[in-house]
Image (cartoon, rainbow, N blue to C red):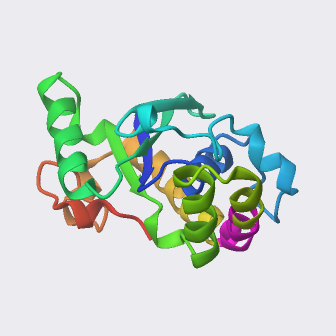
Amino acid sequence: MLIIYYDVGGAHSVQTAAGIHLNVLPQEGSPQPAELFKMKKFDNITKADYGRIIYAGTDEWGNNVYTLSCQYASPVVVPAIRDMHRLAGGNPHELLMVSTLGTINTLMKIGGFTSRRLKWVSFGRPIVVRGTLQAYPQIALLVSEVKELLPKLMEDNSWLKNSWASTYQDAQPEEIILH
């Protein structure tokens, strides 16, 4: 299974989600601010990383976990990835794309913009870290929903046809967003 966590910038919510998914960051409670930087791309995405599928690690089931900065083009990027996966011979039931957009708060937006776009890292980074810690319970909940879904996906995908987590063969982009 390929799991891709995606959002606009790819530097904060997706890195945190991938870290939780990979057990680098705790599922329960909140990490210390410095722990967020265990994910080497946390607040460290550059323009060269936009649109790139970045490997984060392999989970306890052997699934590869990735992150992606779609910028504001997820309605185009997500279907393109699904189609490319299919064209490359991938099984549609072995690609799970998870949007973290619903977990992003105002502090994350302000801090991320000032740190990444304006390159005012010393000003923006403390703001985005604080915002990420505030959003952490929502991000952890999203990841727990994904991890709860994975065993079902890996053992039998037939239940997906009538599920909210439909596959890319019959899904619209908004149907594959888990919140």
Q: Position of residue 160 (x, y in %)?
A: 26, 57
Q: Which residue occupies the extreme bottom position in the image?
A: 106
Q: Nearer the viewer, residue 108 or 110?
A: 110
Residue 72 in sight here: yes
| Quadrant in which residue 19 is drawn | top right
Q: Is residue 58 above or below residue 3?
A: above
Which quadrant is the C terminus positioned in? Answer: bottom left
Q: Is residue 75 above or below residue 25?
A: below
In the shown orientation, is residue 116 left or right of residue 94? Answer: right
Q: Position of residue 27 (x, y in %)?
A: 73, 57
Q: How many marks?
A: 0
Q: Nearer the viewer, residue 58 or 107?
A: 107
Q: Is residue 105 above or below residue 143?
A: below
Q: Residue at x 62, y 38 (%)?
A: 41
Q: Main secondary structure of the magenta part?
A: helix
Per the rendered image, the range of residues in magenta is 128-137
Q: Residue at x 19, y 59 (%)?
A: 161
Q: Position of residue 12 (x, y in %)?
A: 60, 54
Q: Position of residue 84 (x, y in %)?
A: 17, 31
Asked whether 131 falls inside the magenta stretch, the response is yes
Q: Residue at x 72, y 43 (%)?
A: 23
